[in-house]
Image (cartoon, helix red, strand yellow):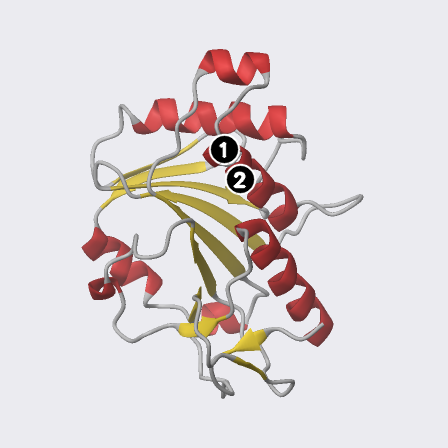
């Protein structure tokens, strides 16, 4: 499988913390992520919530294990910036099925509704929730190599590309993130039709290069 990129990517120096660990962070950007207790109980969650559950599933879970080197963040661009992060390294008591993941998304969103801006909280199973601003998000994200899924006719396949591990961004609807978020434009990757497919292809490519 070849993954399409906009240009041949030359590996850039990264900080010592990143160099010492295998790390990839998927950021899935939502305009909103509606979910209610009754929907979770009845198994009738919204399309956005279904997508979020699938992203966590394919991003973290293996057949008999979990990707401990990977995080999946659900970034909600509503009332500022709200982030729910499933960290493979510390995640506990979350199963790969939709009911389990949606239950914990619901718990996280309930907590976010009461969380002041600038505060990070961790649930007892390792999930992190955070309410932040674009400026603070920019400072955090620009400290790691960034890749973004975008649609461009001129994007071509390049078998020489070696993905560095870093942040991989997929907007559910393009244009949700302001250009001011980035100090420099992220490396552009081809955009599959779904974020879960994007995650699958990135994981495959990095696994192949290891």
**Horizontal and vertical percent for residue 99?**
61, 24
Q: Which residue is mark 2?
A: 51
**Horizontal and vertical percent for residue 62?**
74, 47
Q: Quadrant of residue 95?
A: top right
Q: Is residue 117 above or below residue 100?
A: below
Q: Camera-side residue: 133 or 194? A: 194
2 vs 1, front mark: 1
Mark 1 burial class by Cα count in 10 Å: few <14, some 14-19, many 20+: few
Q: Which mark is residue 75?
A: none
- Circle 2: element type: helix
Residue 210 visible somewhere in the drawing: no
Outermost residue toward the front in this view = 153
Residue 96 visible somewhere in the drawing: yes
Q: From the image, which quarter does the N terminus lie in? A: bottom right
Residue drawn at x 59%, y 47% is: 88
Q: Which residue is mark 1?
A: 47
Q: Are marks 2 and 1 in contact (CB under 8 Å)?
A: yes
Q: Quadrant of residue 141?
A: bottom left
Residue drawn at x 58%, y 39% is: 91
């Amino acid at each position: 499988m070849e993954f399409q990129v906009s240009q041949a990517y030359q590996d850039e120096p990264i900080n010592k913390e990143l160099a010492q660990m295998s790390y990839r962070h998927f950021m899935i950007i939502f305009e909103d992520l509606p979910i209610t207790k009754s929907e979770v109980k009845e198994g009738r969650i919204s399309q956005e919530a279904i997508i979020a559950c699938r992203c966590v599933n394919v991003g973290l879970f293996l057949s008999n294990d979990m990707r401990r080197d990977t995080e999946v963040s659900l970034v909600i661009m509503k009332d500022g910036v709200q982030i729910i992060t499933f960290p493979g390294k510390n995640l506990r008591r979350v199963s790969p099925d939709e009911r389990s993941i949606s239950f914990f998304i619901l718990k996280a969103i309930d907590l976010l509704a009461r969380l002041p801006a600038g505060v990070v909280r961790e649930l007892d199973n390792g999930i992190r929730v955070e309410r932040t601003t674009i400026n603070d998000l920019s400072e955090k994200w620009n400290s790691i190599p960034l890749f973004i899924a975008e649609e461009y006719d001129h994007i071509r396949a390049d078998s020489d590309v070696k993905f560095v591990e870093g942040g991989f961004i997929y907007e559910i609807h393009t244009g949700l993130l302001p250009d001011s978020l980035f100090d420099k434009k992220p490396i552009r990757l081809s955009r599959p039709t779904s974020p879960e497919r994007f995650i699958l292809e990135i994981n495959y490519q990095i696994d192949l290069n290891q």
